């Protein structure tokens, strides 16, 4: 990636590291320069960030407490008939 | 056991629980189940998209973990080891349901399809508020279901469960670049698909090729 000549493709390649805060300082500066004038990459960056936040903040598969208790009982019953390190069930 | 747990930090406590469970202490193992059952269920649901299968995966993963505790050396976290078992169980379930095609975490995903953004309209300031909670949940489920299993598994571990790239790589037995590549594609494809629900009306359709 050349300084001040970051293309959208280069930006996309670095997007994951940029969003995760793991891009190195020099790369980060170049990407931010690109973001200042490239509207499309700015939108892609913001909406990708939002995508991650929406999935993180809205857990779509919660385990209901009644089902949780049922599963827990079933697991412990099976374990009781088994031994750690011994795959043969009784 | 209780005394050890109260005094020690979380990691030490976890190790103590694992050591006790290895010796056959079921109460210790029960605590490990309670600590991670919600996470395992979520991961299994995301991979299988079937509640019955996800319930089976939770039971089978914990039972296998219990039966194979001797093999757990403590080089990695118990949770990392457990999730690796659960992901394999979930992928097996998925394979059984889709006999017509192979399902693998490392299936060939080296395609540029869906990587280059086409939708560049900005989103509404608070896109989640455009929908009720139930409707939003349906949109999110439907959208992630459309991703290949290898993509959505990486996305769920990294972005939903908040695990590191290194932990995800270890759980899925993938290289770090492979995890990063799948994560980027998963994020971009989800973004693309969510745009049709969340984009701002004032930006028009916003579809054009990026340069």
Image (spheres, rainbow, N blue to C red):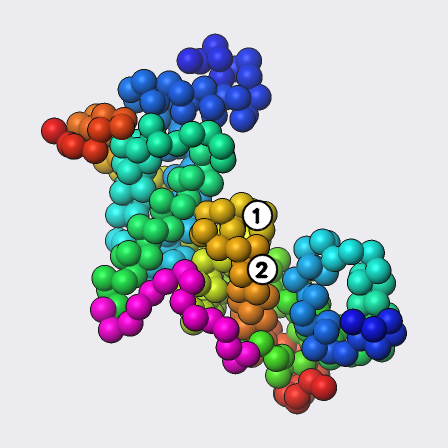
Which residue is at a point 82% across and 56% down the rendered structure image? A25
Q: Secondary structure at mark 2?
A: helix
> Which chain's residue wears label 1?
B
> Which chain's residue wears label 2?
B
Counting from the top left corner in percent of width and height, residue A20 is at: 68, 55
Point out the stretch of residues depicted in magenta: B99-113
User: Which quadrant, please, contains the N terminus of chain A?
Assistant: bottom right
User: Counting other residues with Cα less than 10 Å from the Cα at mark 2, is it few (<14), some (14-19), or many (20 or more)?
Assistant: few
Residue at the far top: name it: B3
Question: Does residue A55 appear anywhere in the picture?
Answer: no
User: Which quadrant, please, contains the C terminus of chain A?
Assistant: top left
Which mark is on residue B177? Answer: 2
Which residue is at a point 54% across and 25% down the rendered structure image? B10
Query: Which of B193 and B117 lies nearest the eye of the viewer?
Result: B117
Position of A65 with respect to A29 (left or right) is left
Q: Which residue is mark 1?
A: B166
For marks 2 and 1, the one nearer the N-term is 1
Q: Quadrant of residue B64?
A: top left
Which residue is at a point 44% across and 13% down the rendered structure image? B2
Which residue is at a point 27% across and 32% down the rendered structure image? B67
Name the chief secondary structure element in magenta. Answer: loop
Counting from the top left corner in percent of width and height, residue B174 is at: 48, 55
Q: Secondary structure at mark 1?
A: helix
Position of B27 with respect to B131 (left or right) is left
Query: Which of A62 and B17 lies nearest the eye of the viewer?
Result: B17
Question: Does residue B111 appear anywhere in the picture?
Answer: yes
Counting from the top left corner in percent of width and height, residue A46 is at: 70, 67
Distance (Cα) linking label 2 and label 1: 10 Å
């Amino acid at each position: 990636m050349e300084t001040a000549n970051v293309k959208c493709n280069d930006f996309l390649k670095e997007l994951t590291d940029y969003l995760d805060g793991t891009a190195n300082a020099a790369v980060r500066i170049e990407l931010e320069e690109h973001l200042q004038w490239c509207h499309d990459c700015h939108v892609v960056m913001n909406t990708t960030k939002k995508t991650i936040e929406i999935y993180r903040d809205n857990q779509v598969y919660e385990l209901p407490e009644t089902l949780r208790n049922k599963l827990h009982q079933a697991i412990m019953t099976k374990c009781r008939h088994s031994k750690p390190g011994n795959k043969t069930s009784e | 056991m209780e005394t050890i747990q109260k005094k020690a930090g979380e990691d030490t406590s976890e190790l103590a629980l694992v050591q006790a469970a290895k010796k056959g202490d079921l109460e210790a193992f029960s605590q490990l189940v309670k600590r991670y059952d919600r996470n395992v269920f979520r991961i299994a649901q995301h991979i299988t998209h079937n509640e019955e299968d996800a319930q089976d995966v939770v039971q089978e993963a914990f039972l296998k973990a219990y039966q194979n505790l001797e093999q757990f050396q403590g080089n990695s976290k118990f949770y990392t080891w457990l999730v690796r078992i659960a992901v394999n169980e979930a992928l097996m379930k998925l394979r059984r349901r889709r006999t017509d095609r192979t399902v693998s975490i490392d299936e060939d995903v080296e395609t540029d399809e869906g990587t280059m953004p086409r939708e560049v309209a900005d989103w509404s300031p608070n896109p989640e508020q455009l929908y009720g909670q139930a409707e939003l949940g349906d949109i999110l489920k439907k959208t992630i279901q459309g991703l290949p299993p290898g993509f959505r598994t990486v996305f769920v571990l990294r972005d939903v469960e908040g695990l590191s790239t290194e932990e995800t790589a270890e759980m899925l037995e993938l290289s770090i670049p492979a995890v990063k590549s799948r994560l980027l594609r998963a994020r971009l494809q989800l973004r693309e698909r969510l745009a049709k629900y969340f984009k701002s009306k004032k930006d028009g359709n916003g579809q054009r090729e990026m340069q």
